[in-house]
Image (tube, rainbow, N blue to C red):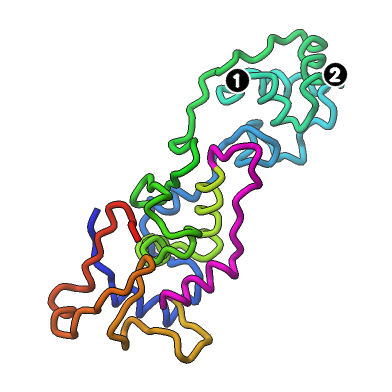
Amino acid sequence: MTTHMDTEAIREAKATRDGGPLVARPEEVDAFLEPEEAVGFEEGLPLLDKEYGEYPDDPLTPDSGADVAALADHELVGSVEDLAAELDADAGKVRTALELHDLEEPNAGGSFDAPAVEHEGVIEVPLHGVIEVEHLRSPVYTDARLLEHLYIRCGCGISEIKEILEDGMNAGRSGDKSPWRVTEREIRTALEDVALISSADPEGIDPMNSKDVRLGGATFSQLDEEDRSSSGGLNVAVEDFGG
Protein backbone atom coordinates (compact mmCIF):
# COMPACT_ATOMS: atom_id res chain seq x y z
CA MET A 1 0.00 0.00 0.00
CA THR A 2 1.36 3.42 -0.94
CA THR A 3 -0.05 6.69 0.28
CA HIS A 4 0.82 10.36 0.54
CA MET A 5 1.33 12.28 3.73
CA ASP A 6 -1.69 14.57 3.68
CA THR A 7 -0.27 17.87 4.87
CA GLU A 8 -3.69 19.51 4.89
CA ALA A 9 -5.10 16.75 7.11
CA ILE A 10 -2.15 17.09 9.47
CA ARG A 11 -2.57 20.86 9.62
CA GLU A 12 -6.29 20.46 10.36
CA ALA A 13 -5.63 17.79 13.03
CA LYS A 14 -3.03 19.95 14.75
CA ALA A 15 -5.42 22.90 14.78
CA THR A 16 -8.58 21.17 15.97
CA ARG A 17 -8.17 17.66 17.39
CA ASP A 18 -5.44 17.74 20.07
CA GLY A 19 -5.35 13.95 20.18
CA GLY A 20 -9.10 13.39 19.85
CA PRO A 21 -10.82 11.28 17.18
CA LEU A 22 -11.82 12.61 13.78
CA VAL A 23 -15.61 12.87 13.52
CA ALA A 24 -15.90 12.41 9.75
CA ARG A 25 -13.69 9.34 9.35
CA PRO A 26 -14.08 6.16 7.25
CA GLU A 27 -16.89 3.89 8.41
CA GLU A 28 -14.48 0.95 8.31
CA VAL A 29 -12.61 2.45 11.25
CA ASP A 30 -15.72 2.60 13.44
CA ALA A 31 -16.58 -0.97 12.42
CA PHE A 32 -13.05 -2.09 13.36
CA LEU A 33 -13.33 -0.46 16.79
CA GLU A 34 -16.85 -1.64 17.55
CA PRO A 35 -16.78 -4.28 20.32
CA GLU A 36 -17.82 -7.81 19.40
CA GLU A 37 -19.01 -10.81 21.37
CA ALA A 38 -16.09 -12.55 23.04
CA VAL A 39 -15.63 -15.38 25.53
CA GLY A 40 -14.77 -14.17 29.03
CA PHE A 41 -16.58 -12.20 31.70
CA GLU A 42 -16.44 -8.50 30.75
CA GLU A 43 -14.44 -9.38 27.64
CA GLY A 44 -16.12 -7.77 24.65
CA LEU A 45 -19.90 -7.93 24.44
CA PRO A 46 -21.82 -10.39 26.66
CA LEU A 47 -22.73 -13.72 25.07
CA LEU A 48 -26.09 -13.64 26.85
CA ASP A 49 -28.76 -11.15 25.86
CA LYS A 50 -28.22 -9.22 29.09
CA GLU A 51 -25.61 -7.10 30.82
CA TYR A 52 -22.77 -8.77 32.72
CA GLY A 53 -24.23 -7.45 35.96
CA GLU A 54 -27.33 -9.58 35.31
CA TYR A 55 -25.38 -12.82 34.88
CA PRO A 56 -26.14 -15.53 37.48
CA ASP A 57 -24.08 -15.21 40.64
CA ASP A 58 -23.98 -18.98 41.09
CA PRO A 59 -24.44 -21.44 38.17
CA LEU A 60 -25.65 -24.09 40.65
CA THR A 61 -28.88 -22.33 41.57
CA PRO A 62 -32.07 -23.58 39.87
CA ASP A 63 -32.90 -20.21 38.31
CA SER A 64 -29.51 -20.07 36.56
CA GLY A 65 -30.26 -23.13 34.41
CA ALA A 66 -31.60 -21.21 31.41
CA ASP A 67 -28.56 -18.94 31.27
CA VAL A 68 -26.11 -21.82 31.65
CA ALA A 69 -27.93 -23.71 28.88
CA ALA A 70 -27.87 -20.69 26.56
CA LEU A 71 -24.15 -20.18 27.10
CA ALA A 72 -23.34 -23.87 26.71
CA ASP A 73 -25.11 -23.78 23.34
CA HIS A 74 -23.45 -20.55 22.16
CA GLU A 75 -21.34 -20.89 19.01
CA LEU A 76 -18.36 -19.19 20.66
CA VAL A 77 -18.34 -21.47 23.70
CA GLY A 78 -16.34 -24.57 22.79
CA SER A 79 -15.42 -26.01 26.18
CA VAL A 80 -16.23 -26.08 29.87
CA GLU A 81 -13.32 -23.70 30.34
CA ASP A 82 -14.91 -21.21 27.94
CA LEU A 83 -18.20 -21.49 29.79
CA ALA A 84 -16.47 -20.98 33.13
CA ALA A 85 -14.61 -17.93 31.80
CA GLU A 86 -17.85 -16.37 30.58
CA LEU A 87 -19.60 -17.03 33.90
CA ASP A 88 -16.54 -15.95 35.91
CA ALA A 89 -16.76 -19.24 37.77
CA ASP A 90 -14.59 -22.22 38.61
CA ALA A 91 -14.52 -24.90 35.89
CA GLY A 92 -15.27 -27.63 38.44
CA LYS A 93 -18.36 -25.80 39.63
CA VAL A 94 -19.48 -25.30 36.02
CA ARG A 95 -19.19 -29.06 35.34
CA THR A 96 -21.32 -29.71 38.41
CA ALA A 97 -23.83 -27.12 37.21
CA LEU A 98 -24.09 -28.81 33.81
CA GLU A 99 -24.85 -32.11 35.49
CA LEU A 100 -27.31 -30.47 37.87
CA HIS A 101 -29.20 -28.80 35.01
CA ASP A 102 -28.99 -31.99 32.89
CA LEU A 103 -26.96 -30.24 30.17
CA GLU A 104 -24.23 -31.56 27.89
CA GLU A 105 -20.76 -30.08 27.98
CA PRO A 106 -19.94 -27.72 25.09
CA ASN A 107 -18.13 -29.43 22.22
CA ALA A 108 -14.39 -28.81 22.21
CA GLY A 109 -13.61 -26.31 19.50
CA GLY A 110 -17.27 -25.57 18.81
CA SER A 111 -17.84 -23.32 15.80
CA PHE A 112 -15.63 -20.57 17.13
CA ASP A 113 -14.19 -18.31 14.45
CA ALA A 114 -10.64 -17.43 15.45
CA PRO A 115 -9.67 -13.78 15.24
CA ALA A 116 -7.72 -12.62 12.21
CA VAL A 117 -4.64 -12.11 14.38
CA GLU A 118 -3.95 -14.76 17.01
CA HIS A 119 -0.18 -14.93 17.33
CA GLU A 120 2.60 -12.73 18.57
CA GLY A 121 4.66 -10.60 16.23
CA VAL A 122 1.82 -9.03 14.24
CA ILE A 123 -0.85 -6.44 14.85
CA GLU A 124 -3.97 -5.59 12.86
CA VAL A 125 -4.93 -1.99 12.10
CA PRO A 126 -7.95 -0.54 10.29
CA LEU A 127 -7.69 0.39 6.60
CA HIS A 128 -4.57 -1.76 6.20
CA GLY A 129 -4.76 -5.15 7.86
CA VAL A 130 -1.94 -7.13 9.44
CA ILE A 131 1.49 -5.59 10.04
CA GLU A 132 4.54 -7.48 11.24
CA VAL A 133 5.91 -5.89 14.39
CA GLU A 134 9.48 -6.44 13.24
CA HIS A 135 8.89 -3.80 10.57
CA LEU A 136 7.97 -1.20 13.19
CA ARG A 137 10.10 0.80 15.58
CA SER A 138 10.38 -0.49 19.12
CA PRO A 139 8.29 0.23 21.07
CA VAL A 140 5.67 0.21 18.32
CA TYR A 141 3.86 3.31 19.56
CA THR A 142 6.90 5.41 18.57
CA ASP A 143 6.71 4.38 14.90
CA ALA A 144 5.71 7.53 13.05
CA ARG A 145 4.32 5.83 9.94
CA LEU A 146 2.04 3.78 12.17
CA LEU A 147 1.02 6.87 14.14
CA GLU A 148 0.36 8.86 10.96
CA HIS A 149 -1.77 6.01 9.62
CA LEU A 150 -3.83 5.61 12.80
CA TYR A 151 -4.15 9.26 13.79
CA ILE A 152 -4.42 11.01 10.41
CA ARG A 153 -5.65 8.48 7.85
CA CYS A 154 -7.87 6.45 10.18
CA GLY A 155 -8.86 9.41 12.38
CA CYS A 156 -8.33 7.51 15.63
CA GLY A 157 -8.00 9.38 18.91
CA ILE A 158 -5.31 8.67 21.46
CA SER A 159 -7.49 6.35 23.56
CA GLU A 160 -8.43 4.39 20.41
CA ILE A 161 -4.80 4.10 19.33
CA LYS A 162 -4.03 2.72 22.79
CA GLU A 163 -6.83 0.15 22.42
CA ILE A 164 -5.70 -0.94 18.93
CA LEU A 165 -2.07 -1.31 19.94
CA GLU A 166 -2.74 -3.13 23.22
CA ASP A 167 -5.24 -5.51 21.59
CA GLY A 168 -2.83 -6.22 18.75
CA MET A 169 0.28 -6.68 20.87
CA ASN A 170 -1.51 -8.94 23.37
CA ALA A 171 -3.25 -11.16 20.80
CA GLY A 172 -1.71 -14.60 21.15
CA ARG A 173 0.84 -13.33 23.67
CA SER A 174 2.49 -16.09 25.66
CA GLY A 175 0.91 -16.62 29.06
CA ASP A 176 4.27 -16.43 30.80
CA LYS A 177 4.71 -12.83 29.64
CA SER A 178 3.20 -9.76 31.27
CA PRO A 179 0.48 -8.05 29.20
CA TRP A 180 1.84 -5.42 26.81
CA ARG A 181 0.73 -1.96 27.92
CA VAL A 182 1.07 1.61 26.73
CA THR A 183 -0.29 4.76 28.38
CA GLU A 184 -2.20 7.55 26.71
CA ARG A 185 0.53 9.90 27.90
CA GLU A 186 3.16 7.86 26.05
CA ILE A 187 1.10 7.95 22.85
CA ARG A 188 0.54 11.69 23.15
CA THR A 189 4.26 12.26 23.63
CA ALA A 190 5.01 10.08 20.59
CA LEU A 191 2.52 12.07 18.49
CA GLU A 192 4.17 15.28 19.65
CA ASP A 193 7.61 13.89 18.85
CA VAL A 194 6.65 13.25 15.23
CA ALA A 195 4.77 16.57 15.01
CA LEU A 196 1.30 15.15 14.45
CA ILE A 197 -0.13 17.10 17.38
CA SER A 198 1.09 20.40 18.78
CA SER A 199 3.83 20.08 21.34
CA ALA A 200 4.30 22.17 24.45
CA ASP A 201 7.95 22.29 23.39
CA PRO A 202 8.41 25.50 21.35
CA GLU A 203 11.31 23.82 19.57
CA GLY A 204 9.18 20.88 18.41
CA ILE A 205 9.29 20.20 14.67
CA ASP A 206 6.30 21.37 12.65
CA PRO A 207 5.99 19.52 9.33
CA MET A 208 4.35 22.56 7.78
CA ASN A 209 7.22 24.89 8.63
CA SER A 210 10.24 22.56 8.72
CA LYS A 211 12.51 21.15 6.07
CA ASP A 212 12.30 17.69 7.62
CA VAL A 213 9.60 15.30 8.73
CA ARG A 214 10.37 12.49 11.16
CA LEU A 215 8.85 9.22 10.02
CA GLY A 216 9.57 5.75 11.37
CA GLY A 217 12.73 6.91 13.07
CA ALA A 218 14.27 8.34 9.89
CA THR A 219 14.23 11.92 8.58
CA PHE A 220 12.61 12.50 5.22
CA SER A 221 13.24 15.70 3.26
CA GLN A 222 9.96 17.50 2.80
CA LEU A 223 8.88 18.44 -0.69
CA ASP A 224 9.24 22.06 -1.51
CA GLU A 225 6.10 24.15 -1.64
CA GLU A 226 5.70 23.88 -5.40
CA ASP A 227 5.95 20.07 -5.43
CA ARG A 228 3.55 19.78 -2.50
CA SER A 229 0.93 21.84 -4.22
CA SER A 230 1.04 19.60 -7.29
CA SER A 231 1.39 16.18 -5.66
CA GLY A 232 -0.73 16.64 -2.52
CA GLY A 233 1.93 15.68 -0.03
CA LEU A 234 5.03 13.67 0.74
CA ASN A 235 5.14 10.22 -0.83
CA VAL A 236 5.47 7.64 1.93
CA ALA A 237 5.64 3.93 1.15
CA VAL A 238 3.86 2.03 3.91
CA GLU A 239 3.67 -1.50 2.52
CA ASP A 240 5.17 -2.78 5.74
CA PHE A 241 5.42 0.42 7.80
CA GLY A 242 9.18 -0.18 7.84
CA GLY A 243 11.43 2.13 9.80
In x, y percent, where is residue 175? Answer: 64, 37
Was residue 95 drawn as part of the magenta stretch in this picture?
A: no
| Mark 1, other Cα within 10 Å: few <14 / some 14–19 / many ≥20 | many
Question: Which image quarter: residue 57?
Answer: top right
Per the image, the residue denoted by label 2 is 62
- Residue that appears at 50% across and 59% down: 139
Question: Which image quarter: residue 95?
Answer: top right
Q: Nearer the viewer, residue 218 or 101?
A: 218
The magenta-colored residue range is: 171-196
Was residue 188 drawn as part of the magenta stretch in this picture?
A: yes
Per the image, the residue denoted by label 1 is 78
Per the picture, the main secondary structure of the magenta-coloured stretch is loop
Identify whether 220 is placed above or below 176.
below
- Residue that appears at 41% across and 53% down: 29
- Residue that appears at 77% across and 37% down: 54
Secondary element type, mark 1: loop
In x, y percent, where is residue 37? Answer: 57, 36
Q: Looking at numbered disc 2 in the image, what kind of residue is underneath it? A: Pro
In x, y percent, where is residue 197? Answer: 45, 77
Mark 2 against mark 1, which lies toward the viewer? 1
Q: In the rendering, which numbered label is found on residue 134?
A: none
Say which quadrant the C terminus sits in. Answer: bottom left
